[in-house]
Image (cartoon, rainbow, N blue to C red):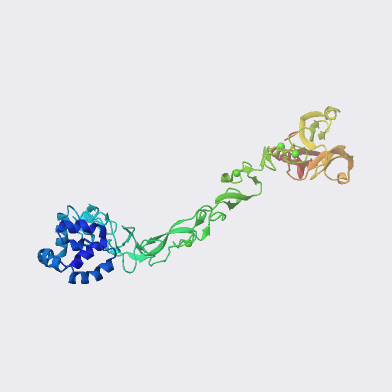
C-alpha cells in the first residue's frame, strides 16, 4: 500500500482518519488532515519527497511489506477487525446480510449482496434491503420489475412465457382473450351482446336484454325481441292470443285488437280476448248489460229475444162446430161467444206494435162463405178487411215459428196451425196446404 491509499481513505472521512492511522501505528506526518482531497494528492508528492522521507523509510516500510502480501480488501478487512469493527464501504467485507454503513463505517443491518438475502430474493444494494427484484432480468417471463416487485408485464425485451402473446404490455392467450381474440387488439365484439373468444375466434356468448340472435349466425344479436309479435321476448316466440290480433310490447305479448264479437274484458292479455260480447254482463261491450226492449233483438244477451213483458199480444184459437169455422181473435170474449168454443188461449202471439221486419196480420171476412181468414195482404186478397190482429214476422226472427195456412174447399174454412203434425193431419182429412202465412211467437215473451 502506498501513501495515496491512506489519502483515499481520508477522502470519505477525513475527520476519522486520525483514529484510523493512530491504530495502525503510521507515522505522525500522515496524521495531518487534509481538508480537500485534491490538495492531498497534489501536496503529498512534495511531502513524501522531502519531510516524509524518514517516516517512509521506517514505519511505512514494515506495513508496506505486509500490504504487498495481501489484497487491499483483505487489508481493509484486517484493518476493520483491528479497528474494533470499522469497515470500508468501497470495499465492503461485512457479512452478506450486513453492509458497511457509510456514516459509522461499521457493519450495519441490511444486505450488501444477493447472497445476503433468502433465495430467490435479491439485494437492493442502494437501500440494503432484500427485494423481489431490482431489474427485469430478475423476473420470470411475462413479468417486469416495477417498484422492486415482479408484476405482470411484457415488452419486446421481456417476452411472454409459453404460447402467450404480448399485447398492450400484457401477456394474453389470444385463443381465449376477448380483447385480443386471434391477435392483439382484435376485440371480440358482439352487436347487442357479449362474446367469448374460443380458439382465437369470437363467438356469441349472450345477447343483451331485449335482443336475440334470431338468424342464429352465432355472431350477432341483430333482432329486437321487444316489439315483434313473431319474436316476442325471445326468437321465434310467436304471440298467439285467442280471438285477438297480437302485438308485442316490451317483450310481452299484448292485444292489438280483438276479433269481432270478442273483448279483452279481464285486461289479461294472456288469455286473449276471452269475453264473448254477446254474453250477459258483456253484452255489446265489456261490462255492458243493456235493458231488454221490444225490438226483435236479445238486447241483454241472455239468449232470449224480447224477454220482457208488453211486447206481444195473445191470439186465441177457437172453433165453431156448427159452421166448421176455425176462428182466431185477440179478444177472449169474442173467442167464446156466438157458439165458439175456445181451443187454445193463447194459441200464439203477435207483436202489439210495429217493429222493423214485421208486417200487419189482417183479419178478413169472406162474405161468400161467411167465414174469416188472415193474411198479410193489406187488401185481404180482394176480400173484406176487418182489422189487424197484430204484427207478424215474414221470417223466423226472434224465436218466431211458422204459422201454416190451410183451407178446406168443402166449406171455405181457413185453418191456421203452428203444429207440423197437425198440418199433416189436416191435409190428410181434406185440407189444402196454402203455405206459411207468416211467423208468430209461442210465448208472450222470450
Ligand atoms: Ca345473429
Ligand atoms: Ca283477456
Ligand atoms: Ca233477452
Ligand atoms: Ca229486445
- Residue 336 at x, y = what percent? 83, 27
Q: Residue furthest front?
A: 51
- Residue 146 at x, y = what percent? 34, 59
Horizontal arrangement in the rendering, residue 229 relative to residue 110 (left or right):
right
Quarter of the image for the C terminus: give it.
top right
Instruction: Choose between 311 and 268: the one closer to the eye.
Output: 268
- Looking at the rendering, which quadrant does residue 369 occupy? top right
Q: Above or below — where is 11 with respect to 277?
A: below
Quarter of the image for the N terminus: give it.
bottom left
Q: Above or below — where is 268 with respect to 1?
A: above
- Residue 97 at x, y = what percent? 21, 54
Horizontal arrangement in the rendering, residue 216 relative to residue 11 (left or right):
right
- Looking at the rendering, which quadrant does residue 323 occupy? top right
Q: Is residue 408 visible?
A: no
Horizontal arrangement in the rendering, residue 188 relative to residue 345 (left or right):
left
Q: Above or below — where is 379 with respect to 21?
A: above
Instruction: Choose between 25 and 350: the one closer to the eye.
Output: 25
- Residue 373 at x, y = what percent? 83, 39
Instruction: Choose between 380 and 426: the one closer to the eye.
Output: 380
- Badge count: 0
Q: Is residue 247 visible?
A: yes
Q: Quadrant of ligand 3?
A: top right
Q: Residue at x 52, y 54 (%)?
A: 210
Amino acid at each position: 500500500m502506498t501513501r495515496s491509499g491512506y489519502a483515499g481513505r481520508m477522502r470519505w472521512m477525513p475527520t476519522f482518519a486520525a483514529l484510523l492511522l493512530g491504530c495502525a501505528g503510521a507515522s505522525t506526518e500522515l496524521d495531518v488532515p487534509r481538508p480537500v482531497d485534491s490538495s492531498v494528492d497534489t501536496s503529498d508528492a512534495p511531502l513524501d519527497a522531502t519531510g516524509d522521507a524518514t517516516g517512509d523509510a521506517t514505519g511505512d516500510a514494515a506495513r508496506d511489506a505486509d500490504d504487498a502480501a495481501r489484497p487491499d480488501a483483505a487489508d481493509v478487512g484486517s484493518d476493520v477487525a483491528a479497528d474494533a469493527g470499522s469497515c470500508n464501504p468501497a470495499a465492503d467485507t461485512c457479512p452478506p446480510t450486513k453492509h458497511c454503513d457509510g456514516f459509522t463505517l461499521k457493519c450495519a443491518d441490511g444486505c450488501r449482496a444477493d447472497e445476503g438475502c433468502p433465495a430467490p430474493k435479491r439485494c437492493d444494494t442502494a437501500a440494503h434491503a432484500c427485494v423481489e427484484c431490482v431489474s427485469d432480468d430478475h423476473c420470470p417471463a411475462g413479468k417486469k420489475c416495477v417498484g422492486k416487485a415482479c408484476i405482470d408485464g411484457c415488452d419486446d425485451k421481456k417476452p411472454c412465457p409459453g404460447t402467450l402473446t404480448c399485447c398492450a404490455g400484457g401477456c394474453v392467450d389470444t385463443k381465449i382473450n376477448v380483447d385480443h381474440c386471434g391477435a392483439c387488439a382484435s376485440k371480440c365484439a358482439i352487436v347487442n351482446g357479449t362474446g367469448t373468444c374460443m380458439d382465437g375466434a369470437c363467438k356469441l356468448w349472450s345477447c343483451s336484454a331485449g335482443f336475440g340472435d334470431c338468424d342464429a349466425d352465432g355472431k350477432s344479436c341483430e333482432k329486437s325481441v321487444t316489439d315483434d309479435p313473431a319474436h316476442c321476448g325471445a326468437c321465434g316466440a310467436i304471440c298467439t292470443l285467442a280471438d285477438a290480433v297480437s302485438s308485442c310490447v316490451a317483450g310481452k305479448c299484448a292485444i292489438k285488437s280483438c276479433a269481432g264479437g270478442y273483448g279483452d274484458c279481464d285486461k289479461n292479455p294472456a288469455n286473449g280476448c276471452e269475453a264473448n260480447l254477446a254474453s250477459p254482463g258483456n253484452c255489446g261491450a265489456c261490462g255492458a248489460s243493456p235493458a231488454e226492449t221490444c225490438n226483435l233483438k236479445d238486447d241483454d244477451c241472455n239468449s232470449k229475444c224480447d224477454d220482457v213483458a208488453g211486447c206481444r199480444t195473445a191470439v186465441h184459437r177457437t172453433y165453431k162446430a156448427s159452421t166448421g169455422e176455425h176462428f182466431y181473435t185477440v179478444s177472449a170474449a169474442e173467442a167464446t161467444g156466438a157458439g165458439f168454443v175456445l181451443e187454445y188461449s193463447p194459441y200464439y202471439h203477435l207483436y202489439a206494435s210495429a217493429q222493423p221486419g214485421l208486417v200487419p196480420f189482417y183479419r178478413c171476412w169472406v162474405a161468400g162463405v161467411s167465414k174469416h181468414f188472415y193474411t198479410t195482404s193489406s187488401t185481404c186478397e180482394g176480400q173484406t178487411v176487418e182489422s189487424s190482429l197484430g204484427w207478424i214476422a215474414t221470417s223466423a226472427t226472434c224465436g218466431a215459428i211458422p204459422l201454416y195456412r190451410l183451407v178446406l174447399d168443402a166449406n171455405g174454412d181457413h185453418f191456421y196451425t203452428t203444429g207440423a203434425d197437425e198440418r199433416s193431419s189436416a191435409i190428410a182429412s181434406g185440407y189444402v196446404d196454402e203455405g206459411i202465412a207468416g211467423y208468430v211467437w209461442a210465448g208472450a215473451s222470450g
